[in-house]
Image (cartoon, rainbow, N blue to C red):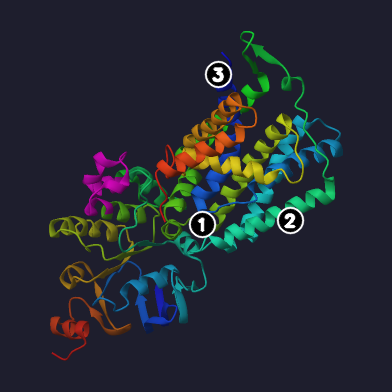
Amino acid sequence: MSWLNALIQGVLLGGLYAIFATGLSLAFGVMRFVNLAHGDLAILSGYLVLSTASTFGIGHVLSVPLVLLVMAGIGYIGQRVLFNRTIGPDPLAGILCSFGIGIVIQNFLLARYTATDKSLDAGSIETSTIRVNESISIGHFSLLTFGSAVVLLGALQLFLSYTSIGRAFRATADDPATAELMGINDKRIYGFAMAIAFATVGIAGFFLGARETFAPASGPNQLLFGFEAVVIGGLGSLWGTLIGGVVLGVAQTFGNQLSVGWNLLAGHVVFLLVLAFRPNGLFGTGVRT
Amino acid sequence: MLIVEGLSAGYEDFRALFDVNLSIKEGETVAIVGANGAGKTTLLRAVMGQVKLHSGSIRFDGVDISSMTTHERVKLGISLVPEGRRIFPSLTVRENLLIGGFTKRPGPWTIERIVSMFPMLDRLLSRSASKLSGGEQQAIAIGRALLSNPRLVLLDEVSLGLAPVVVKQLYSALPAISDQGTTAIIVEQDIHQALAVSDRVYCLLEGKVALTGDTSTVSKSAITSAYFGAAV
């Protein structure tokens, strides 16, 4: 029965990883941009929620929409004035640039908020559970996280499939030079894509901060989970990202079930196995270059 | 409508065009012919803003567009059917056509009209565009360019790599384009095809204009010598 519990908890944990990975997947899918600051941005969002709440005297949950807007704005401006300059045949410039931004964020957070662990307060939903039987209970907050992942990915899928801008995203991802021939400003599309990516990382930052404590240096670990989810699911596949998150989550909870302390190791092992035997991921279509 | 003056352009160290002058009037269909590497594609790419100009200017409707980005030129009403068709592989046929209308320029072209011009597209609309034949992809590329309702459409090597019967099918659609008052520049290696549909012809040789004239009056031998750069 405890294995079934581990499975359920793992699937739900996967929802968090999927939200986190969505932004990575989008930035890579649309502009081949590997954002090494993604984890730090999630942590930054967590701190922004804290600051917004204390500045306006509102709750953490109410602060989230405001923080998402701010993150989207930072994403758009950051892409237009900074990351767009790194786009070119060599992906290294973007990787190094985002790596640098990540370090700047970590040190900014350290200077502004100190190294003390913080956490976010999502209210009573954090601890309330549905008790199935004596060995299985499902947390409302985990369910909410997973549900949010599904809604987020579904909304993104609809946006990409059925809107004019969504089509422009896909066309630009296919072939930016030809997309320009359609009157599409690829630089602007990249800005929009990064705005969405930053907003999703803000959502991830909230769920992460409400689930566990975080500190200025927590970002890189989260980045690793996000990358693992993307690679397991397969680049370029939105629903693959969800499956990737779920596989990673289940691997971690199963590892934990085998022996406490094996949870992270089990996740990494599954990631390496996928990379070795299905380098395009479970649902990936491969990368066009 | 389109005036190119003293245009020199190329790629990094390589210069493909030398002091090219071009003048296109509204409603004309103009052919640009020339051998491989004569600079035809570079000329179209320069008009679209896809290659860097070394010198010279490009004016469209009296406006200097030389320093405009490609997407700004599309919004003004210039559209290119690129060499190699460049269909978006992850979009369906319908989506490939729809994205042509991204700028929402008003005008006569609709998907229904494109389909009635190229009936072969009718049953393909919801298919992925990546697995179609060259002719079908070329029809999509032409339709896609028209859906931006351009005033000037540039067609680059429409016949390249296609069976003669397919080429004939595609070229039979050209009158429908000029009937809308749309100005067209057609780049072709196939001289006969180009002359058959155009009012005027420019012949490029090694990046320079070697000959220009009305299609009805210019002699075959003059074109041949301009094409190959040899006295006949």
Q: Amino acid at mark 1?
A: Asp
Pick whichever of labels 3 and 1 is earlier in the sequence.
3
**Label 2 sits on residue:** A104
Residue A200 vs residue B232: left or right? right
Q: Is residue A160 visible?
A: no
Residue marked by disc 1: A186
User: Which is more foreground, mark 2 or mark 1?
Assistant: 2
Q: Amino acid at mark 2?
A: Val
Amino acid at dot 3: Trp
Judge from the rendering whether residue A229 lies leftward or rightward of residue A110; answer left or right: left
Disc marking residue A3: 3
Q: Is residue B227 visible?
A: yes
Residue A228 occupies which quadrant of the picture? top right
- The quadrant of the picture occupied by the C terminus of chain A is bottom left
Disc on the earlier residue, 2 or 3: 3
Q: Residue at x 27, y 45 (%)?
A: B115
Residue beneath the point at 23% across and 56% down: B173
Q: Position of residue A145 (x, y in %)?
A: 63, 27
Measure the C-alpha gap from mark 3 to mark 1.
Answer: 48 Å
Give the magenta range. B113-137
Instruction: Estimate how packed mark 2 is, as few (under 14), some (14 to 19) or many (20 or more) residues with alpha carbons within 10 Å.
Output: some
Marks 3 and 1 in Cβ contact (< 8 Å) = no
Mark found first going from the N terminus, 2 or 1: 2
Magenta region includes residue A187? no
Residue B88 sits above or below residue B50 on the image: above
The chain containing the residue under callout 1 comes to A
In front: A152, or B162?
Answer: A152
